[in-house]
């Protein structure tokens, strides 16, 4: 699949990074919460991580309502129903056949379940790992609404589909310093402008949450927690 196809699949695939909340007649709140979490785990195991498209379609029909709607500001005109949901699943699998989605944690309250997710995939000889969060509402044993948020920018940087803003800024800053030093030594003075103004750079750093270049190795889930513990205790 070409670059446009991969980008489209990543965007569409983020449509699926969600599951549900379950309306069950009778039973205690704890029983309903447990049933909701079980449904979500099955959704990711039997639909998103299912390489067989026929089996994925059959499972999607069990877990996704025909009234399902994706609530995603980056996808303002989503189509409702099982077929639209499955289209996001299959397009992601077609572009990133090796993708694996891990459910790191689940939190359930009322009709909603929040899933903390980790993704791993490869394309064009590159590998990417990123995270996402899905909020799902379930009624009568099926997902009816999905809200999603995933770190697609990190995925695209790792797959070589997008240049890291901070990396390019650091390279430009280094180049300006080197050029300025050389020009000063030659008695010419330095010149050259920044890619971002100081104000814009602060905005970029605040939105990215970092001032360094994107890490070459990304840890997710328990691996990140383990690495953090090791660093904090040394």
Image (tube, rainbow, N blue to C red):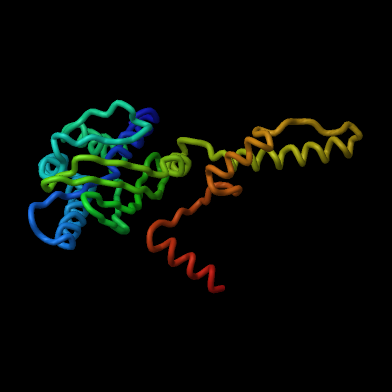
Q: Residue at the far top: name it.
A: 77
Choose between 45 and 187: the one closer to the eye: 45
Taking the spot 53% from the left edge, 37% from the top edge, the residue there is 163
Left or right of residue 97: residue 128: right
In this rendering, the count of numbered labels is: 0
Taking the spot 18% from the left edge, 54% from the top edge, the residue there is 36
Q: Residue at the far left: name it.
A: 26
Residue 81, horizontal then vertical, whole percent = 17, 33
Instruction: Note whether 172 is above or below 25 in the view shown.
Output: above
Instruction: Give the quadrant of residue 226.
Output: bottom left
Residue 56 visible in the current orientation: no
Q: Residue at the far right: name it.
A: 187
Residue 28, horizontal then vertical, whole percent = 13, 61
Residue 163 visible in the current orientation: yes
Image quarter hosting the N terminus: top left
Taking the spot 61% from the left edge, 38% from the top edge, the residue there is 168
Taking the spot 33% from the left edge, 42% from the top edge, the residue there is 148
Image quarter hosting the C terminus: bottom right
Left or right of residue 124: residue 59: left
Instruction: Note whether 123 is above or below 191 in the view shown.
Output: below
Instruction: Give the quadrant of residue 199.
Output: top right
């Amino acid at each position: 699949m070409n670059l446009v196809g991969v980008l489209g699949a990543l965007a569409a695939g983020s449509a699926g990074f969600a599951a549900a909340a379950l309306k069950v007649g009778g039973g205690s709140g704890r029983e309903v919460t447990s049933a909701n979490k079980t449904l979500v785990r099955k959704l990711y195991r039997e639909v998103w991580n299912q390489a067989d498209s026929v089996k994925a379609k059959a499972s999607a029909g069990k877990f996704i309502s025909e009234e399902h709607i994706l609530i995603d500001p980056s996808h303002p005109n989503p189509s409702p129903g099982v077929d639209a949901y499955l289209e996001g699943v299959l397009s992601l699998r077609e572009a990133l056949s090796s993708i694996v989605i891990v459910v790191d944690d689940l939190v359930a309250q009322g009709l909603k379940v929040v899933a903390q997710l980790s993704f791993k995939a490869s394309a064009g000889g590159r590998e990417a790992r990123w995270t996402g969060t899905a909020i799902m509402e379930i009624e009568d044993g099926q997902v009816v609404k999905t809200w999603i948020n995933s770190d697609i920018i990190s995925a695209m940087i790792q797959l070589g589909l997008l240049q890291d803003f901070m990396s390019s800024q650091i390279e430009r800053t280094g180049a300006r310093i080197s050029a300025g030093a050389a020009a000063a030594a030659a008695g010419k003075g330095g010149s050259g402008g920044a890619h971002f103004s100081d104000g814009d750079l602060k905005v970029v750093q605040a939105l990215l949450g970092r001032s360094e270049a994107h890490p070459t190795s990304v840890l997710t889930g328990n691996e990140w927690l383990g690495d953090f513990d090791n660093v904090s205790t040394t």
